[in-house]
Amino acid sequence: MSAGAISNVSPDRSIGRLRRRSRDELLDELAAIFAEGGFADVSVGELARRLRCSRSTLYQMAPTHDDLVLAALGHVFCRIWRRANEAAAAEHGAAAKLQTWALTVIEGAGVLTPRLRGDIVGWEPSRSALEASLREGLADFAILFDAAIEAGEVRPANTLFAFQWLQAACSLANDPVFLQASGLTHRAALEEIRQAFFSGFVISDDRQGIAVTG
């Protein structure tokens, strides 16, 4: 290609040829937009503008605005559980696996801001998607929780209650209004949850010889 021909190629097209964003990257960026302002009032055209891509690129990912929303939410939900399971798998000890899983979920759920959660629960398809995802999360949690009980590192307790407690704590830790009112940083809230959850469920280390790390 001649120098003149190269100069006629727009910067955007040149960059696009060098590296096209993957579907996962676009879904990550969509999730960030939804976290900031929800999804109910943003059009596909506005999303394309903010993502600096064409509408056709988005329509290749999903045929409608609603399908695009559900694709982004599904991507976020799956990523939360996947990262938690991967983090837990790297730990040793049943209580350590449970703790790491729980805190990784809470951190990952930070993208589910109060504004986004409001849109999710206010629209039946997204609410159903969230409920289905929570059932998947509960199944993963139950495996780790039951294993910790069997290992004698966690006291016998109702699994659904423990999961719902964790879910409520997750909402608080990621709620900026609550954090401001409490004076806690997000990191400090996570530590409070760690202490409260494991003080309530984990058998003390002087009885079992286990250490719960921070």
Image (spheres, rainbow, N blue to C red):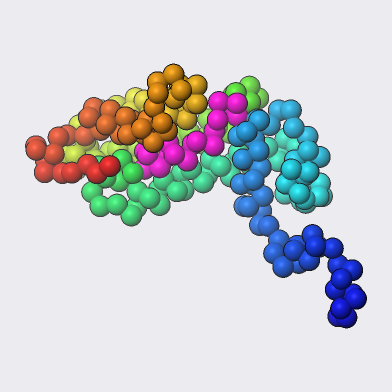
Report the predominant secondary structure element of the magenta stretch: helix
Residue 133 as seen in the image, left or right of residue 167: right
Check if residue 114 falls in the magenta segment: yes
Residue 202 percent across, percent down from the top left:
21, 34
Q: Which quadrant is the C terminus positioned in?
A: top left
Identify the residue at horizontal 34%, vertical 52% (top origin).
89
Q: What is the tally of numbered marks visible in this picture?
A: 0
The correct choice, above or below, for 208 with respect to 9 in the image is above
Q: Residue furthest left?
A: 207
Q: Judge whether residue 15 can be spotted in this image.
A: yes
Front residue (pair 206, 70): 206
Residue 107 percent across, percent down from the top left:
44, 39
Identify the residue at horizontal 23%, vertical 49% (top origin).
93
Residue 135 percent across, percent down from the top left:
47, 34
Identify the residue at horizontal 55%, vertical 26% (top origin).
114
Residue 53 as seen in the image, left or right of residue 5: left
Identify the residue at horizontal 41%, vertical 31% (top origin).
185
Residue 17 percent across, percent down from the top left:
76, 67
Front residue (pair 86, 4): 4
Front residue (pair 15, 47): 15
- Residue 104's image quarter? top left
The magenta stretch spans which residues? Answer: 101-117
The correct choice, above or below, for 68 with respect to 11 in the image is above
Check if residue 63 falls in the magenta segment: no
Front residue (pair 95, 109): 109
Q: Which quadrant is the N terminus positioned in?
A: bottom right
